[in-house]
């Protein structure tokens, strides 16, 4: 059995069925670049970064496209607040987004597309929808007539009656039906605008993704992703627009990431209960935030709190302890992390098979992490004297393979530095000598000084182990 995904359109888990054998085409709705992203936004992009990494690991040639919404009411308002042009706003926050995601260990999409660079494509699409009778012009605006698309609501599972009593309906006196949504907005004084057959204006939000995803990936591409809050109206409207232009399906599989909760509410800028991704990355190594983000599978709702981040930091520290202790013991025999693909898992070792089984089941990172934690527990038993290097090395190889696919590089760790390692080892020799001489105060002082410098020391039956602490500070204990 191959990879299975929970398809939001089908409302069930189905076999991943690529349009082109051996290839995956994936489009994810990116940020509206008017502000810094919060950790809830970042979790969605971390999730699809992991999905892309895993698909490549399983042998697929993945093309990942993401958009930047760089024309929007929020951008115009931000420009007024900051007293800069709208393109100054979008450039500033596009760079900030890329910096913030890099700090979390996320690779950027293969192709990043901007709405303002595809206005002509959107105008062409809107003209076609008018010709097909699915859209109408009114006072320089163009609206999509939702009642003309028979399957409107099929993604969200809502009827038109439900929607009339529902949410996020955009009011406008020129609409024929309150549910109709804007494809083109007539220009207002002082706002950016482009020429069109209906007069100067700018595109609506929804049309950009329908147009740009098909331009770069073609109709019927494999995966369309985003946060679950986009299912309605954004993705519902994308379906209506695209399948008004082409024969369905517009997308083969719809995947939606779960929301992040802040106590009892969804984290959102409108509620004012956000924590910026960059603030989290300043307080914790980016890989700790990454581990927190994937502790639940991508579709699950997770809670952001100091406790949940602390749990992730402790788990990450445990991984590093194992990796550093293995390197200390194996020395030149320590395996190196390497790029690996496993299209066929039948010959994979036990923990890798567990990892693949979990991730093949709708990218279940929660169960995948359970395999890593069990692997580390077994590895620590070997390190504590219950096994030989011949047993340890395959465990380390599996650890590096799995954590590499998950996006962990431990790049902030200087434990491998010859100079740092040599100095720490020398100080530990002095500490051991002091203990042998029963000069415990001197031995305590060495350990305390190392702790102040962020070096945690652990005494085991096979000798002292050390690591650079990701949380810093003193690791109290006996010398």
Image (cartoon, grey):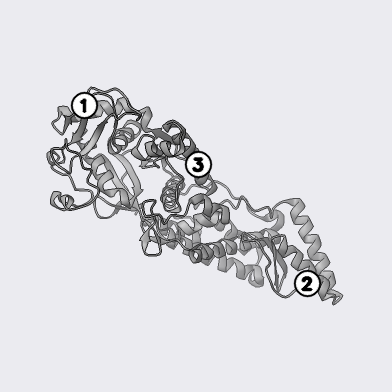
Q: State the residue in front, 3 or 153.
A: 153
Residue 322, by quadrant, is: bottom right
Q: Work out whether mark 3 precedes mark 1 in sequence or the reverse, and give the earlier one.
A: 3
Whether residue 69 is visible here, answered yes or no, is: no
Q: Nearer the viewer, mark 3 or mark 2?
A: 3
Residue 157 screen position, x and y as percent? 20, 52
Residue 188 screen position, x and y as percent? 29, 30
Q: Which residue is painted at 47% across and 39% down in the image?
A: 93
- Measure how far apart labels 2 and 1 are at the Cα level: 78 Å
Q: Residues within 10 Å of mark 3 (few under 14, many from 20)?
A: some
Q: State the residue in front, 265 or 109.
A: 265
Q: Which residue is mark 3?
A: 96
Do the CB atoms of the residues marked 3 and 1 lie less than 8 Å apart?
no
Q: State the residue in front, 257 or 283.
A: 283
- Measure how far apart labels 3 and 2 are at the Cα level: 45 Å
Q: Which residue is mark 1?
A: 127
Q: Is residue 305 above or below residue 272?
A: below
Quarter holding the N terminus is bottom left
Q: Is residue 198 above or below residue 293?
A: above
For this orientation, the residue located farthest to the bottom is 438
Q: Residues within 10 Å of mark 2 (few under 14, many from 20)?
A: some
Residue 16 screen position, x and y as percent? 32, 48
């Amino acid at each position: 059995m191959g990879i299975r995904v929970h398809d939001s359109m089908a409302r069930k888990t189905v076999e991943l069925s690529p349009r082109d054998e051996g290839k995956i085409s994936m489009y994810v709705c990116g940020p509206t670049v008017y502000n810094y992203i919060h950790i809830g936004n970042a979790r969605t992009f971390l999730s699809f970064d992991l999905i892309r990494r895993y698909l490549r690991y399983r042998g697929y040639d993945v093309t990942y496209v993401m958009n930047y919404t760089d024309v929007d009411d929020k951008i115009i308002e931000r420009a007024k607040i900051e007293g800069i042009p709208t393109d100054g706003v979008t450039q500033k926050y596009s760079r900030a987004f890329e910096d913030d995601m890099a700090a979390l260990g996320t690779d950027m999409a293969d192709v990043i597309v901007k709405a303002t660079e595809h206005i002509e494509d959107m105008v062409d699409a809107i003209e076609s929808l008018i010709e097909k009778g699915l859209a109408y012009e009114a006072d320089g605006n163009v609206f999509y007539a939702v009642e003309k698309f028979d399957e409107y609501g099929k993604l969200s599972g809502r009827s038109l009656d439900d929607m009339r009593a529902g949410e996020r309906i955009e009011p406008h006196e020129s609409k024929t039906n309150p549910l109709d949504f804007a494809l083109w907005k007539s220009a207002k004084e002082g706002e950016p605008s482009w020429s069109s057959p209906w007069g100067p204006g700018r595109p609506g939000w929804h049309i950009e993704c329908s147009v740009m995803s098909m331009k770069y990936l073609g109709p019927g591409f494999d995966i369309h992703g985003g946060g679950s809050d986009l299912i309605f109206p954004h993705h519902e409207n994308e379906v209506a627009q695209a399948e008004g232009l082409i024969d369905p399906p517009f997308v083969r599989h719809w995947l939606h990431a779960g929301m992040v909760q802040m106590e009892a509410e969804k984290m959102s800028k409108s509620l004012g209960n956000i924590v910026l991704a960059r603030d989290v990355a300043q307080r914790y190594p980016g890989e700790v935030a990454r581990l927190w983000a994937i502790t639940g599978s991508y579709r699950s709702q997770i809670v952001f709190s100091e406790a949940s981040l602390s749990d992730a930091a402790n788990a990450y520290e445990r991984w590093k302890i194992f990796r550093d202790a293995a390197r200390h013991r194996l020395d030149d025999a320590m395996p190196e992390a390497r790029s690996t693909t496993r299209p066929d898992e039948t010959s994979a070792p036990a923990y890798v098979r567990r990892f693949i089984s979990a991730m093949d089941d709708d990218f279940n990172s929660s169960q995948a992490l359970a395999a890593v934690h069990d692997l580390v527990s077994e590895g620590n038993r070997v390190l504590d004297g219950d096994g030989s290097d011949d047993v340890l090395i395959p465990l380390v190889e599996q650890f590096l393979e799995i954590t590499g696919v998950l996006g962990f590089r431990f790049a902030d760790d200087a434990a491998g530095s010859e100079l740092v390692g040599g100095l720490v080892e020398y100080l530990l020799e002095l500490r051991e000598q002091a203990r042998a001489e029963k000069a415990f105060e001197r031995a305590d002082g060495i350990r305390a000084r190392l702790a102040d410098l962020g070096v945690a020391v652990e005494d085991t039956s096979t000798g002292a182990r050390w690591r650079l602490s990701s949380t810093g500070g003193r690791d109290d204990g006996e010398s």
